[in-house]
Image (cartoon, rainbow, N blue to C red):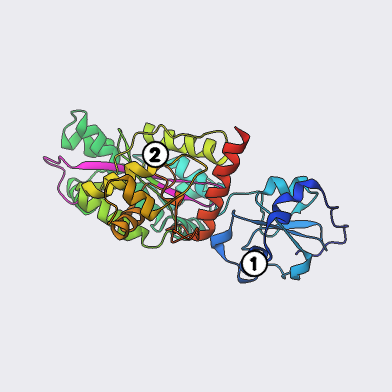
Amino acid sequence: MIADTKPAPSNSNLQMFDRDLSIQSKQDYYRALTDRNAEFDGVVYYGIKTTGIFCRSVCTARKPKFENCEFYQSARDALLAGYRPCKRCQPMSLPNEISPMLKQMIEAVEAEPEKRWKDQDFCNLGIDSSTARRQFKKRFGMTFVAYARARRIGLAVEQMRHGSSVIDAQLDAGFESGSGFRDAFSRILGSPPKGFQGLVLKSSWIDTRLGPMIAIASDDALYLLEFTCRRGLERGVERLKARTKAAVVPGMNLILKMIERELTEYFSGVREHFETPLTPIGTEFQKRVWSELVRIPKGEVRSYSQQAIAIGSPNSVRAVARANGANQIAIVIPCHRVIGADGELTGYGGGLAIKKWLLKHEAAICTNH
């Protein structure tokens, strides 16, 4: 897709994924490339015979002809087939992967969570403050100042839970003004610091080969894990906060580190089962449905009617489908393993392309083990 005079790679048995695809699937993948469809980013990679390079679906370069495309399920497969990564769309990086600059900023906050950031602090890091603010807002949906302030409030809550007085927690969190601390605390957590007893959940973004996911957890269990591209994600987080009467602040804990490690192993094909403790929030019926989802063996699928029978409620197929869609812990509670009675893939919050990829990935894991 980027001009190049190098010869195209020769065919090999590494192109099995391309040969196994139906014409319709190839046309769907090609349409995703011409439309720059982010839903397919990380799901399929495109080898361009005329240039000898491979790209991701969101590449902005001039599009090749359909007959000049080969399709791969991983960047590794495209490399092994002899293609070189496109310099424009950089297919060797994870979809929407956090930039080194934003990673540097987050690490700086974690190193000094009580710090009040000023323009000079950005300069000291060799970062342009206006660029940093713009990129941070685009990536996380909040300004860097708001992120750092929420992190400081989370620090204050931790101090108070360990017996510190309000004034000590205020000062340790870098707030010189008592009124400023109370205002910020009330705005973020919904109540003043004195006598605060609410649950505080920490949130973190996790980069995966299918795009970033957001994880929300207490110190004891995971409450939410969703692809950030999921429709209605913000409403889902608000529902979680309302049902748990919890505040959600940026941060990291052992549960978030655990699910990040397990997801890395899952996407690498070396983990079959998750061990992260879960606290799914829902009705008793929804929890029954979700418990049954976990019992579906990796590499297999079930229909909604089969799931309804499995929970002892064969006439509740539609209710089972709604409960399936209400699941907020993606992959770990595998709602992607439920398909239509006719064998067709049905709705998935992260998109059908991701659902299809997950099922193929799990089938491959089972084959390899």
Q: Quadrant of the N terminus?
A: bottom right
Q: Furthest-top residue in view? A: 163
Residue 26 magenta: no
Asked if disc 1 and disc 2 are in contact, CB closer than 8 Å, the reply is no
- Amino acid beneath label 1: Gln
Mark 1 vs mark 2, CA separation in Å: 32 Å
Question: Which is nearer the eye, 117 or 323?
Answer: 323
Classed neighbour count for the residue bearing mark 2: other residues with Cα under 10 Å, few (<14), some (14–19), many (≥20): few
Report x, y in % for residue 203.
36, 45
- Amino acid beneath label 2: Arg
Q: Quadrant of residue 111?
A: top left
Q: Is residue 71 left or right of residue 336?
A: right
At x 44% / y 45%, what residue is drawn?
331
Depicted 269 relative to depicted 357: above or below: above
Q: Quadrant of residue 155?
A: top left
At x 57% / y 48%, what residue is drawn?
360
- Per the rendered image, the range of residues in magenta is 189-214
* Residue 12 shows up from this direction: yes
Judging by the rendered image, the residue that carries numbered circle 1 is 24
Question: Which is nearer the eye, 150 or 357?
Answer: 357
Q: Is residue 97 left or right of residue 152?
A: right
Q: Which mark is residue 295?
A: 2
Q: Furthest-left residue in view? A: 195
